[in-house]
Amino acid sequence: MLFSKPKTTALGLSLLPASLAQLSDLSVFPPGGPGTILVTLNGHSAFTGCLNDQGLWTVKDACASFEGNGQGGLGLDLGYIILDSSSSIVTTTGTWSTAWVGTHVNQGRNAAWLQAQIGTAGAAPWGGPLWYANTQPDDTANVALNGHAITDSVQVTLTFNSTLVAS
């Protein structure tokens, strides 16, 4: 069956408003305020741990409480979480050097699919929205996450889960 160009164009344009409406609900910007960073296995919906105060994926330790400065920095009591030169998530007691952004729905405070140093490629540190680990953590060991693919790795996404209490 052949389609004429006018009918195909009309069909495409009729679908456009619905697509734009869905996209307008999503925006990418840095997390702000207090929150935790939850870890989800890629393709799953349930969280499977969080980042601890050392920036490690854990299921045995308490989730760290982070403070998003609204400009890309994610701080905690020990300093900031950043990417080291090999793109692994680590903490530093110095200043923040990694800009974090996430996808917010309806301008909400939660930020899914966290990325670090968005727009960076090559040898410079960057990562997300997929993060990689050699294995999953258990009740005896935490696991480091890396922004670059690792052979035979576990793939996860990170979500900034706001703990801001509205007054």
Image (cartoon, rainbow, N blue to C red):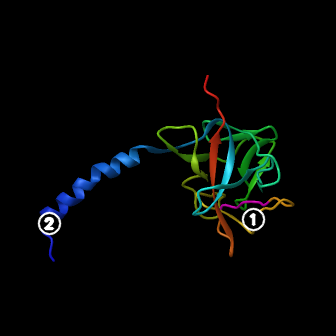
- In the image, residue 138 lies at what x, y percent? 81, 62
Could you say which is closer to the camera, residue 22 or residue 54?
Answer: 22
User: Residue 148 location, x and y as percent?
Assistant: 65, 65
The disc label shown at residue 158, or none: none
Query: Does the segment drawn in magenta span residue 18?
Result: no
Mark 2 crowd level (few <14, some 14–19, many ≥20, 10 Å Cα): few
- Residue under circle 1? 136
Residue 119 left/right relative to 68: left
**Amino acid of disc 1:** Gln
Q: Residue furthest right?
A: 140
Q: Position of residue 44 (x, y in %)?
A: 59, 61
Q: Secondary structure at mark 2?
A: helix
Characterize the magenta stretch by its predominant secondary structure: loop
Q: Residue at x 58, y 61 (%)?
A: 121
Is 142 on the left or on the right of 43, as rendered? right
The foreground one among 38 and 89 is 38
Secondary element type, mark 1: loop
Q: Earlier in the sequence, mark 1 or mark 2?
A: 2
Q: Residue at x 66, y 58 (%)?
A: 125
Q: Quadrant of residue 1?
A: bottom left
Q: Which residue is mark 2?
A: 5
Q: Nearer the viewer, residue 48 or 3?
A: 48
Q: Which residues are magenta?
A: 143-147
Along the line of sight, which residue is nearer the eye, 42 or 153?
A: 42
Relative image position of residue 11 (x, y in whole percent): 20, 60
x 74%, y 69%: residue? 134
The quadrant in which the C terminus is found is: top right
